[in-house]
Image (cartoon, rainbow, N blue to C red):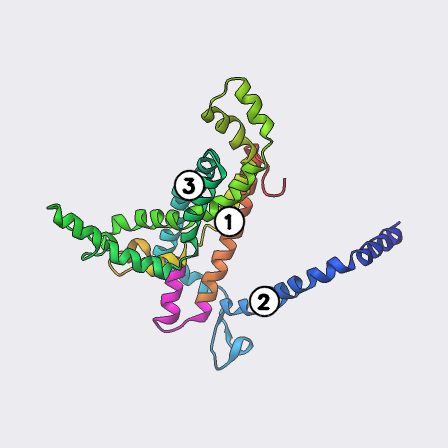
Amino acid sequence: MNRGRAKALHVRIWEARYLYLLLLPLVAFLVVFKYIPMVGLQIAFKKYSAKLGIWGSKWIGMDNFRRIFISPDAVRSIRNTLIISFERLIFEFPVPIILAMLINEMPGRGIKRVYQTILTFPHFLSWVIVASILNNFLSNTGSLNALISKLGGTPVSFLATPKLFRPILYITANWKHMGYSSIIYIAAIAGIDPTLHEAAIVDGAGRLRRIWSITIPCISSTIIVLFIMQVGNIMNAGFDQTFNMMNDAVKPVADILDTYVYTITFKATPSYGFSAAVGMFKSVINFAMLIVADRVIKLLGGGGMFA
């Protein structure tokens, strides 16, 4: 029986050989650039020396990982990363869903395309450009403070006030990404059977009732999968945005793990073993959160990622 199965598998592989050939470049890319570099993860357990190389460096076990929880700056960056990531789930994750439903309810395809184009465009701007625009607009001599002064108010240091930094972070992230992120939800909404809405209209259901009872349940599987993936990325709080917008005045509330690793690697005496340990720590936590989120969703009656 096993021989028969093996033969059948061999036959199926041969019949689909051209599909496997198309898949080969992607597999080669993953092996060369994703799996083989994992050999270098061993420097997280070593006192890495460029002179001695990966294999010749001294093995120090878990010392680099212990340093993560001993260093006050590292602990602060972990706390900031978790706070910012969880707040992003609250203030950013629902926005593309709401936007997709708003665009879907607009009359006429032309106006929908116009709004989609306008709202998607900021996604393709670099955070370097966005941060420069914000600096010109929100700095002490920026346009907004000039307007406040003209109106008789007191200028506010928006980008140098710790209490304002995180709200600005979420607002600008929503402005930049909500249009692009809403595309997948718009596609999911487009796949809903229109007869469901027609039947609901006949029964006298209003627009909000149809959104709540038809649209949201029909795209719930898409929302769940993307939510689980977002939770599984909890230790990545947005390096590009934070790095370009952060300054010394807001560093206590803005310094996340990625910016901390950048600082210790390029602005101080490099410690590549410690940087690798932080990266591995992030990956393990992200993987654990992905599994936990998937299990929790299933316990709550959802489908999970592999339903």
**Residue at the image position 58 percent from the left and 33 percent from the top:** 192
Q: Specify whether 99 is left or right of 167.
A: right
Is 178 included in the stretch rendered in magenta?
no
Work out whether residue 286 or residue 110 is closer to the camera in this orientation and state it. Answer: 110
- Rounded to the nearest whole Å, what is the CA distance between mark 2 and mark 1? 22 Å
**Residue at the image position 45 percent from the left and 70 percent from the top:** 272
Relative image position of residue 96 (x, y in whole percent): 45, 42
If the image is split into quadrants, where does the C terminus sit? Answer: top right
Cβ atoms at labels 3 and 2 below 8 Å apart: no
Q: Which residue is mark 2?
A: 33
- Rounded to the nearest whole Å, what is the CA distance between mark 3 and mark 2? 34 Å
Q: Amino acid at mark 2?
A: Phe
Q: Which residue is mark 3?
A: 95
User: How many numbered marks have been drawn onto this rendered protein structure?
Assistant: 3
Can you say whether 213 is above or below 111 in the image?
above
Q: Amino acid at mark 3?
A: Val
Q: Nearer the viewer, mark 3 or mark 2?
A: 3
- Rounded to the nearest whole Å, what is the CA distance between mark 3 and mark 1? 19 Å
Q: Which residues are magenta?
A: 256-274
Work out whether residue 223 or residue 190 is closer to the camera in this orientation and state it. Answer: 190
Most extreme residue toward the top is 203
Q: Which residue is mark 1?
A: 232
Q: Earlier in the sequence, mark 3 or mark 2?
A: 2
Most extreme residue toward the bottom is 51
